[in-house]
């Protein structure tokens, strides 16, 4: 069985949800993750914070960011076990992130750890 990362992409990083809306989304997300976990397929995951973040560019250039005015932001990810990319896609289809217009969940198979460092 392979592991897949489900990456949450938000179309408009400049929109700020109310604390009430954030709580609703968090509750929905926890129920969604719970349904995957109940099948023994949840591996782990995290949200991504913006405070204190930096972007490292070529030639050692470091900037503050990401910034809210960018077109797309990464909000977080989870890792799941799945027998195929199609099964991982089915998990992704239930993600509450998809309620937002233009939002998406990218599904990527993780490379297997072959013992190389």
Image (cartoon, helix red, strand yellow):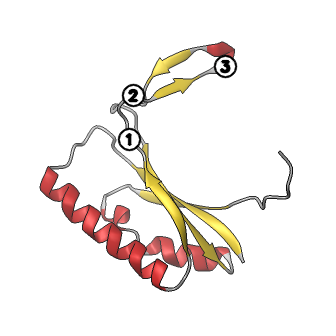
Residue 49: mark: 1
Pointer 1 with pointer 2, Cβ within 8 A: yes
Pointer 1 with pointer 3, Cβ within 8 A: no
Horizontal side of residue 84 vs 19, given as left or right: right
Query: Where in the figure is residue 56, as x and y percent of width and height?
Result: 58, 23
The total number of labels drawn is 3
Residue 100, image x and y in percent? 31, 59
Q: Residues within 10 Å of mark 1 (few under 14, many from 20)?
A: few
Q: Which quadrant of the view contains residue 30?
A: bottom left
Q: Could you say which disc has been placed on residue 52 in the image?
A: 2
Residue linked to disc 3: 58
Q: Position of residue 78 (x, y in %)?
A: 51, 62
Badge 3: how crowded within 10 Å, few (<14), some, or many (20+)? Answer: few
Q: Using the rendered image of the protein, determine whether residue 8 is visible from the camera's viewpoint.
A: no
Give the vertical position of 61 relative to 103 (above or below). Answer: above
Q: Position of residue 39 (x, y in %)?
A: 51, 86
Quarter of the image with the N terminus is bottom right
**CA distance for labels 2 and 3:** 20 Å
Task: Describe the element under mark 1 as helix, strand or loop.
Answer: loop
Q: Depth-wise, is mark 1 or mark 3 nearer the camera? A: 1
């Amino acid at each position: 069985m392979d592991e897949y990362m489900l990456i949450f992409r938000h179309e408009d990083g400049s929109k700020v949800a109310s604390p009430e809306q954030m709580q609703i989304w968090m509750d929905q997300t926890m129920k969604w993750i719970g349904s995957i976990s109940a099948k023994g397929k949840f591996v782990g995951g995290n949200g991504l914070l913006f405070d204190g973040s930096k972007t490292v560019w070529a030639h050692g250039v470091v900037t503050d960011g990401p910034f809210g005015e960018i077109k797309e932001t990464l909000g977080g990810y989870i890792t799941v076990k799945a027998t195929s990319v199609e099964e991982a896609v089915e998990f992704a289809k239930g993600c509450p992130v998809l309620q937002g217009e233009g939002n998406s969940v990218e599904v990527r198979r993780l490379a297997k750890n072959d013992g190389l460092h």
